[in-house]
Amino acid sequence: MKKKIDKLINKSLRFHHRDIHEKLDGMKSKAQVKSKFYYIFWGIATVAVVVGQLYVGTGYRLLHGSMQELLDKVDGVLLHATPNDGPDYL
């Protein structure tokens, strides 16, 4: 009797697993369609980050050039100024 019950349980589990595998196979095709959009999204996000980095880098380069120009103009005034007669706390 126990063998018959075990046989029925095993048989029902086999069919149950087959149903699960059929459902998973059906889901795989949907996941592949989603993965296309996943890669498109991350591709666009990567390009946006790289373009943003280039934009910020260009801004820093322009800022550096402007600062160098300003320091060249002010260099003579700051370094060659006459000493102040006031107290020196340093």
Image (spheres, rainbow, N blue to C red):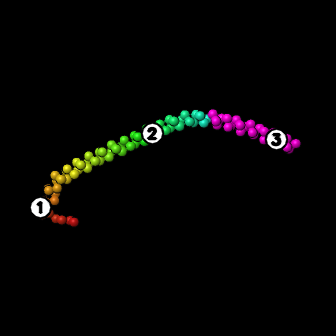
For discs 2 and 3, the disc positioned in front in the rendered view: 2
Q: Amino acid at mark 1?
A: Thr
- The percent position of residue 87, horizontal first and vertical second, equals 16, 65
Tally of numbered discs: 3
- The percent position of residue 48, horizontal first and vertical second, equals 40, 40
Gap in Å between the C-alphas at discs 1 and 2? 60 Å
Say whether residue 44 is left or right of residue 25.
left
Query: How busy is the neighbourhood of tag 3: few (under 14 within 10 Å), some, or many (20 plus)?
Result: few
In terms of image quadrants, where is residue 46?
Answer: top left
In terms of image quadrants, where is residue 18?
Answer: top right
Sooner in the amino-acid sequence: mark 1 or mark 2: 2
Indicate whether residue 90 is drawn in magenta.
no
- The percent position of residue 76, horizontal first and vertical second, equals 14, 56
The residue under label 2 is 43
Name the dominant secondary structure of the magenta segment: helix
Indicate whether residue 16 is drawn in magenta.
yes
Marks 1 & 2, CB-CB < 8 Å contact: no
For discs 3 and 1, the disc positioned in front in the rendered view: 3
Residue shown at 45%/39% (left/top)? 43
Say whether residue 15 is left or right of residue 47.
right
User: For numbered disc 2, what is the local secondary structure?
Assistant: helix
Say whether residue 38 is left or right of residue 60.
right
Query: How busy is the neighbourhood of tag 2: few (under 14 within 10 Å), some, or many (20 plus)?
Result: few
Query: Which residues make up the magenta segment?
Result: 1-26
The residue under label 3 is 7
- Mark number for residue 82? 1
Gap in Å between the C-alphas at discs 2 and 3? 53 Å
User: For numbered disc 1, what is the local secondary structure?
Assistant: loop
Query: How busy is the neighbourhood of tag 1: few (under 14 within 10 Å), some, or many (20 plus)?
Result: few
- The percent position of residue 58, horizontal first and vertical second, equals 30, 45
Which quarter of the rendered picture does the N terminus lie within?
top right
Q: Amino acid at mark 2?
A: Gly
